[in-house]
Amino acid sequence: MEQKELQQIASHFQIEGNIVEVKPLGNGLINTTYMVVTEGDAPNYVLQNINVAIFPDVELLMNNIVAVTGHIRAKLEAAGTDDIDRKVLKFVPCQCGKFYYEHDGKFWRVMVFIPDTVSKSGVTPESSYIVGETFGDFQASLADIPAQLGESIKDFHNIEFRLQQLREAMEADKMGRLAETKDIADELMKRAEDMTRSERLFREGKLPKRICHCDTKVDNILFDKDENVLCVIDLDTVMPSFVFSDYGDFLRSAANTQPEDSADYDKIEFRMDIFKAFTEGYLKTARAFLTPIEIENLPYGATLFPYMQTVRFYADYLNGDTYYKIQYPEHNLVRTRNQLTLLQRAEAHIPEMEAFIKEQLA
Ligand code: GN1
Ligand code: MG
């Protein structure tokens, strides 16, 4: 986009200082992000074009994010924390008062840029402990949020809904891919009853939904130069869900010894060193608010996400690869078999997971 147009969009927000330039920032896969550089002492800003193909309800999305950041900020203020503007994101309203601005069918938002930060990537037991501790703390600070949040992606982590999508894909069998992959369908269907237990417990009033991040990974934490945690970022998927959304989805990606699209199924293991480090960090900050049913089902959560991802990849494979981008025709089938293997490896560790959690709480 043209510099002039970007600057015009940025100037519709209530920012301090004169804009010097707007330049590309980071390499996010979903939204397009820019840095708004201002003159002199005024802060710089982050300008983002929101991907409405994935987040169609911008009003709901921004209501969620503003409620969450506002709640965390109020808590930090009440606790007399210093340097609050580095410890929670600050969104800036546009001149019209809303926290987004629509221009030519595109939706934009602005937040204050936090300088001198670093991000980490890569999985180690040390970083997994920090992720557990940080996201447990994130859930804990939102456990008493009074605002009603909506689902920025409807039924995102609803396993009954994901299974329904799979059943429809199997019924249609559009590409004729079901017969030769029937073993996968069987493995998934025989677990369906057990794997949907979270939704049943919820309907029975036994399992709460809480505000979860739903994209739990170390890349979504900002650190200062000394590697202290500053804040959680990338709040688009923050929504009501089961705590397993943060707990299980982190383990799904971090505890796999192979990338999620590796066809070296024999090399797939579920890393218990990562499980233990992450769980220890998570329980440190989350145990105070977790209910006994949530705790008891954490190992279930660790298997639910490989299961759900298998269901999603397989449904997409049967549908002819319309959701996940593929690099070769069998890509989604490979991802499916990878996640199914991870599920089986994780299942084999359930007794050890249970014993570890018990030990932690003793
Ligand atoms: C998608 O685009 P990415 O990699 O952040 C998906 C996640 C899946 C993940 C599997 C909005 O996330 O739910 O777990 O792929 N996000 C959406 O790789 O569907
Ligand atoms: Mg991702």
Image (tube, rainbow, N blue to C red):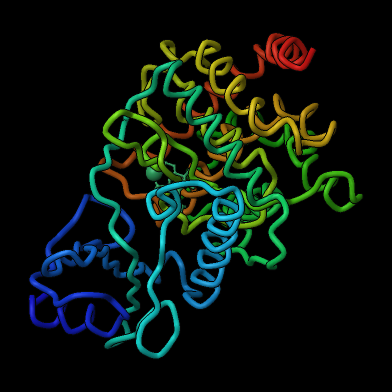
Q: Which of these two is toward me, 63 or 327?
A: 63
Q: How many marks?
A: 0
Residue 176, given in percent of the width and then of the height, sits at 48, 48
The residue shown at (56%, 18%) is 275
Q: Nearer the viewer, residue 56 or 311?
A: 56
- For the C terminus, the image quarter is top right
In the rendered image, the residue lying farthest to the right is 204
Work out whether residue 329 can be spotted: yes
Spot occupied by residue 22 in the image (x, y as percentages of width and height): 13, 68
Left or right: 283 in relation to 80: right
Instruction: Examine the image and state in which quarter residue 218 appears.
Output: top left
Q: Nearer the viewer, residue 284 or 48?
A: 284
Measured from the top left, where is residue 30 in percent x and y? 33, 57
Q: Is residue 47 left or right of residue 308?
A: left
Instruction: From the viewer's perspective, tell me whether residue 164 is left or right of residue 5.
Output: right
Quadrant holding ligand 2? top left
Q: For the view shown, which residue lies furthest in the bottom direction?
A: 96
Residue sitting at x 28%, y 76%: 15
Q: Is residue 175 above or below residue 226?
A: below
Q: Which residue is pictured at 74% across the width and 51% down the height? A: 209
Q: Is residue 313 left or right of residue 109?
A: right
Compared to 192, does 104 lie above or below? below
- Indicate whether 320 appears above or below 38: above
Where is residue 106, by image quadrant?
A: bottom left
Q: Quadrant of the N terminus?
A: bottom left
Residue at (66, 43) in percent of width and height: 140
Give coordinates of residue 197: x percent, y percent.
Answer: 80, 39
The reply to whether residue 179 is visible in this rendering is no
